[in-house]
Amino acid sequence: MRRTRHLLAGLALTAGLLAGAVPATAAPETPVPTAAAASSYTWKNVRIDGGGFVPGIVFNRTEKDLVYARTDIGGVYRWNQAASSWTPLLDSVDWDHWGHTGVVGLASDTVDPDRLYAAVGTYTNDWDPGNGAVLRSADRGATWQRTDLPFKLGGNMPGRGMGERLAVDPHENSVLYLGAPSGNGLWRSTDSGVTWSKVTTFTNPGAYQQDPTDTSGYNSDEQGIVWVTFDESTGTPGTATGTIYVGVGDKENAVYRSTDAGATWTRLPGQPTGYLAHKGVLDAENGYLYLAYSDTAGPYDGGKGQVWRYATATGAWTNISPVAEADTFHGFSGLTVDRQRPGTVMVSAYSSWWPDTQIFRSTDSGSTWSKAWDYTSYPTRANRYTMDVSSVPWLTWGADPAPPEQTPKLGWMTEALEIDPFDSNRMMYGTGATIYGTQELTKWDTGTNFTIRPMVKGLEETAVLDLASPPSGAPLISALGDIGGFRHTDLTAVPSMMFTSPNFTSTTSLDYAETNPDVVVRAGHLDGGPHVAFSTDNGANWSAGQEPSGVTGGGTVAASADGSRYVWSPDGTGVHTGTGGAWTASTGIPAGATVESDRVDPKAFYGFKDGTFYASTDGGATFTARATGLPAKGNARFKAVPGTKGDLWFAGGAPDSTYGLWHSTDGGATFARVSGVEQADTIGFGKAAPGAAYPALYTSAKIGGVRGVFRSTDAGASWVRINDDARQWGWTGGAITGDPRVYGRVYVSTNGRGIIYGDTTETGGGTDPTDPPAPSGTCKVAYKVTNQWQGGFQADVTLTNTSATAWTGWKLGWEFPAGQRIGQMWNAGPAQTGTAVTAQNVGWNGPVAAGASASFGFTGTWTGTNPVPAAFTLGGATCSVA
């Protein structure tokens, strides 16, 4: 990730306030609701793997392989050692407490490893209307109880990579400390997190502000207390640890100490000044407190920094910075020690985007250091490591940078850096987009190259802004914050690349032509670059479009039903219409309106702003105001139904104003409110239920007093909730769509938990992409190498059903004659053993009518020659070759 995490600014209008005032001592436990899974639905993530900032990784110090990760907007995860994957732990966070998906502190109990604590809350300004909380679990995060706090916490605020702000006493585990922001000081619990009170003897609240002039309250919030570290050598089991160190957001007074179990506190004498202490990690065996300093709070910035070592026995301070302060162009943050090898310490240069982050390692307590990479002669680099991102190939960003920059990068925003306390060879570190790690770290010390790979499977942290499921081609195309978006041909596989040419930092809107789904358009943000892009092959390849003057951001965009033209409402200027080249300003519609297209009439487009609905019948050249009285504030989403001209659904509003779901059958001239739907924020359509003619409707809504994801199979006359209390994913108000090819399948947006999709076991449910296809009959194959370069190539394959019977699935096989290897494949699932290859349908493209065709493509590698396969087989029969 290269930019700020997606911000839910303004969500106070839709989320609702947490009820009641909270006294100075926080109220005791509030049970977090859980329920059995909905009987007919199973839920999974559409695989992307990562996609967001991981500011904290916590290894339990007494149980091997017990590891947790915290994210800035996507909750908490627990490591599954057997599967080498992460398990999400906060999916039960509900709509009203969406801010609790931002995690600013995490603590795993070393006395009782079943106990886990999380300090949650996303923003300390008014973007999050609710206060923070401390969640506690006695079963490693499977279930939680909550204590609400009388102040906010900032899991997605500046300084979120510092920490950990939450800590458990390693000897008396009923005692916990929490560092609070915004001038709220240091807090303590003595009953395992049930109640909390302020430590009144700790008097420095940490007043550092990233930017005091920021009127939004985001960069101007006071950083507060940023970490708590216990010296376990000063206590015995069952009694409170005597010496505690605390880091404070104060450049002149960054570190405090208590030697009487937190009764009194003093500024640590002799400490360096002029910097913020991002981390404080204690090596009790050697008696050293290590501190990583930066001139700013991060996680994006930091131009100078230092690393210091404090001798706890003598009080001596030693500057052990890996490079001279004058040579730094970054701060230091990620900090860890090897518990198996005392004296081994590592630190990261967290804030360096160009040319790369840096990681330093010392085996002599910081007296000397080595680097993860260095220059041989500028700009040539020599790396101690090899990056293998084959499991998450999009981490290259499709880039081809000039040296000394490389792709994939070693990282950026590397504030979480941890050596496994039980295994000196295992290290994990968080970046702005993933978790990387290695299982062979000690090769560093022998000068042997070691491999770094993503360790992020199961951790899905994208913010989803728009979704589309076309009637043909890829089953899902997504618009995402920070990493642009993806075309998913297989929901269970990580795509090879995000959208490129151009590569938006965030895609704000996308659409396809209903009757020509190969035509796709997207709009988004890109500093100094284009804001709109077009595809004529269902989103596989893109080209940047021209844009009118004044455009500052993506806004919303719509494609006509036949793909002949587009209407675009970008940020910074008014609504425009065009055919993909030059744009003409639309009239009759205000700037900033949300736009959509009719799914039947290619000349019909619609718009909405401030309670008024607009329509165009001339391809977006002119708009006319139609219905009024729709919600004038809050979230608003509307869509046109495929197959019926002028059939529209509108969802939106705010709790303190008009809020609900509306339906129009006359192109927006009138809207009728749907009874029984109290609140609704999204609307989408999927394949009709068996025996029904009207598409299935899906919405994130409040119906019958319950917030959830709902489905209607009778045009909105009745609704059924299809998620449950254990699967709520915080805020789901960004986008939703059903799948037009699979009854019951729905894709749900989240703000930090990626794309969730649900499948039903009800009659009429579709085939999962992983189900094996049925045997198939006679066939014809056209195999074409479409591009070839030194050592690599791309090929397209068209498989035609030449039998008289429709196929329900297919698996095509062939032998490579010269040892070629499959790389990435789309529209089919690959398998290769030696020279033998199979390509299997991915579920949605399994049915092939007699005389019809299915197509897929792939990239591969070759050496020597790249001849075309001579024969292809399907279900035991040999296909003819075109």
Image: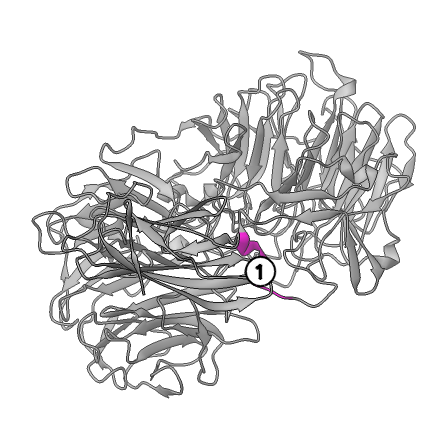
Q: Where is residue 256 in the image (x, y as percent from the top left)?
A: 77, 35
Q: Where is residue 51 in the image (x, y as percent from the top left)?
A: 52, 51
Give the total of numbered labels. Answer: 1
Assign the C terminus to one quadrant of the image: bottom left
Look at the image and tell me whether residue 707 can be seen: no
Look at the image and tell me whether residue 676 can be seen: yes
- Colour scheme shown: one colour
Left or right for 329, reference 196: right
Residue at the disc numbered 1:
3
Assign the N terminus to one quadrant of the image: bottom right
Q: Which of 348 and 851 is in front in this view?
A: 851
Q: Nearer the viewer, residue 452 or 114?
A: 452
Q: Give the range drawn in magenta.
A: 393-400
**Picture layout, residue 236 above or below residue 46:** above
Q: What element carries label 1?
A: loop
Q: Position of residue 551 (x, y in %)?
A: 47, 79
Left or right for 51, reference 201: left
Check if residue 148 falls in the magenta segment.
no
Q: Residue at x 27, y 73 (%)?
A: 607
Q: How crowded is mark 1: few (under 14 residues within 10 Å), some or many (20 or more)?
A: few
**Picture layout, residue 532 above or below residue 171:** below
Q: What's the residue type where badge 1 is placed? A: Arg
Q: Which of 29 and 38 is in front in this view?
A: 38
Check if residue 396 falls in the magenta segment.
yes
Q: Position of residue 877 (x, y in %)?
A: 27, 48
